[in-house]
Structure formats: C-alpha cells, structure tokens
Image (cartoon, grey):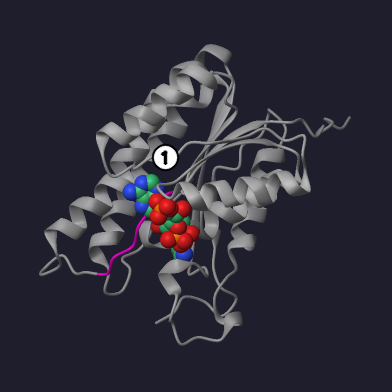
Amino acid sequence: MSVENKQITKKILITGASKGIGKAIAQRAAEEGHDLILTARNSLELAGLKTEIQHQAKHLQVDIFPSDLSTREGTKKLIEHMVQHHKDLDVLVNNAGIFTPGLIQNGSEEDFELMMQVNFYAVFHLTRGLLPAMISRSKGQIINICSIAGQDPYPRAGLYSITKFAMQGFSRCLRDELKDKGIKVTTVYPGATWSNSWSGADLPESRIMQASDVAECVISSIRLSDSAVLEELVLRPQLGDLP
Ligand SMILES: NC(=O)c1ccc[n+]([C@@H]2O[C@H](COP(=O)([O-])OP(=O)(O)OC[C@H]3O[C@@H](n4cnc5c(N)ncnc54)[C@H](OP(=O)(O)O)[C@@H]3O)[C@@H](O)[C@H]2O)c1
C-alpha cells in the first residue's frame, strides 16, 4: 500500500530570503504553490521578490516583514508578527547567515559575536518563539541551513565554523526533543554555493553549486509524508570542497 504524498499548500517562513540560498528556496517554494513569509533586512529587495513571485502566481499569499536578526529586538519583532498573523505556520526555514573569514587565534571578536548573533542566537530565539504554536498543532517542520563548516573545521574560517557547529548541536538536540511531537527537524549542510559570499571569486561557474540545487533538496524534504523526516542532508560541489 502506498502512502499518497498529496501536494498541500503550506505556509513557510524563510529568513534571509532576499538573496542567495534563501531567495532560491522562496522561488522554488512559490513554484510549488506554497504561501510565504519572507524576511531579511533590505525591504526593497523583499518587495522586489514579492512582485516577482506574484507576477508568476497571483493567488499566492506573500507577506514580507523586514527584520534585523543581529539584534534581540529585531528577532522579537519578527516573533511577535508571526504569533499575531501566522499561528498556522507549517515550515520555518532558518537560513539567514553571514560569513566572515577569521581564525580563532587572531580573528575579530566583533565579527565573531555578530556571526554568533545572526547564525546561532537568532535561530535559537526565533525557533523557540515559534515552537509553541507548532507544538499545539502537533505539526510543523524546522529546516536549519547549516554548512559543511558545521561538520568539519573550515579552512581560514574557524570563527564561522564555531557558529555552524553550534547550529548543528542545536538542530540535532531539537530533532530529538520534537520526535514525538509531530514536528520534523531537518539540518542541511551545503558546501560552497554561489551567493554574495562568493562575489568576485575567480572560479568557473561550474566549480561550486547553484543556490537552486540547495533549494531543490529543501523542497523535497517538505514534500515527504508525515511519517518520514529528512534528518540531515549534505550537499557538495561535484568536484568536492574548495581548498
Ligand atoms: N553560500 C555558501 O557557500 C554557503 C555554504 C554553506 C552554508 N551557507 C549558509 O546558507 C545560508 C545562506 O547563505 P547565502 O550564501 O545564500 O547568503 P547571502 O547570499 O549572503 O544571503 C544572506 C541572507 O541573509 C540576510 N541577512 C544577513 N544578515 C542579516 C541580518 N542581520 N538580519 C536578517 N537577515 C540577514 C540577507 O539579507 P539582508 O542583507 O537584506 O539582511 C540575505 O537575505 C547562511 O546561513 C550560510 O551560512 C552558505
């Protein structure tokens, strides 16, 4: 007997939706007919993406909510907006993140603290803020866009790696906590993917992944039936990691 995997419209919040991987996930989710809440700091870029999506699919609900996740206040405002307007959220994609190279021995403490704030603390607080509604509905999915730098030390970027190791720990513990509550937790570990971080890199386009490759996998995880969860997903460029 096959369990039918019906295509159901879901409501998805994507952080860092204005560029790179987050934008690709938003575009792919819109193609699948999902309603979206999109957040990042730049409201003009969010508005442009909303126009683009609704040009393709007028019936989709697209709510844009600019927020700065480097501050507790920004994260709190986003949680309040979600609790007030989107208690029926199905999927939270914790994607917003920043990358600044730097070593533990001499890298900038300010850069590290900012990365911890956006890459980890915002994820921690936002998830906790939105979990009660998911728990009360006994359904939902949390997708954490981590990094291969959260599995192994990343060359010349120990400070960034720490933030992604923290996310890995958070995500795996959360998966364990939410197993029996009907809520899925998916951790995605992408390798190098074309985005802002790579602008100016002297590389052939085929050397690293496209954001759409990561988006495709994220959307596949959303399509699984209620009885299965894609726990962890590692994606790498076909030629492997950059040296
Ligand atoms: N690209 C890669 O090679 C790669 C590899 C592995 C993992 N990742 C991870 O994938 C995620 C997305 O990376 P990406 O390369 O697609 O990044 P990106 O192109 O630089 O986009 C980052 C997104 O996060 C938002 N953002 C940055 N700072 C923010 C803040 N303080 N508050 C709210 N939003 C903020 C940005 O919008 P605003 O600037 O408008 O705020 C943008 O929408 C990150 O978590 C990253 O660590 C990336």
Residue 203 placement (x, y as % from top left): 50, 86
**Which element type, helix, strand or loop, lies under badge 1?**
helix
Q: Residue furthest right?
A: 1
Location of residue 180 with respect to 51 vertically, above or below = above
Q: Residue furthest top?
A: 136
Residue 147 visible (yes or no): no
The residue identified by callout 1 is 172
Left or right: where 12 falls relative to 162: right
Picture mark count: 1
Q: Residue 50: within the magenta?
A: no
Q: Which amino acid does label 1 sit on?
A: Arg
Left or right: where 27 falls relative to 116: right
Q: Residue at x 52, y 12 (%)?
A: 136
Q: Which residue is drawn at 52% across and 70% down?
A: 194
Residue 91 placement (x, y as % from top left): 57, 33
Q: What stretch is highlighted in magenta?
A: 96-101
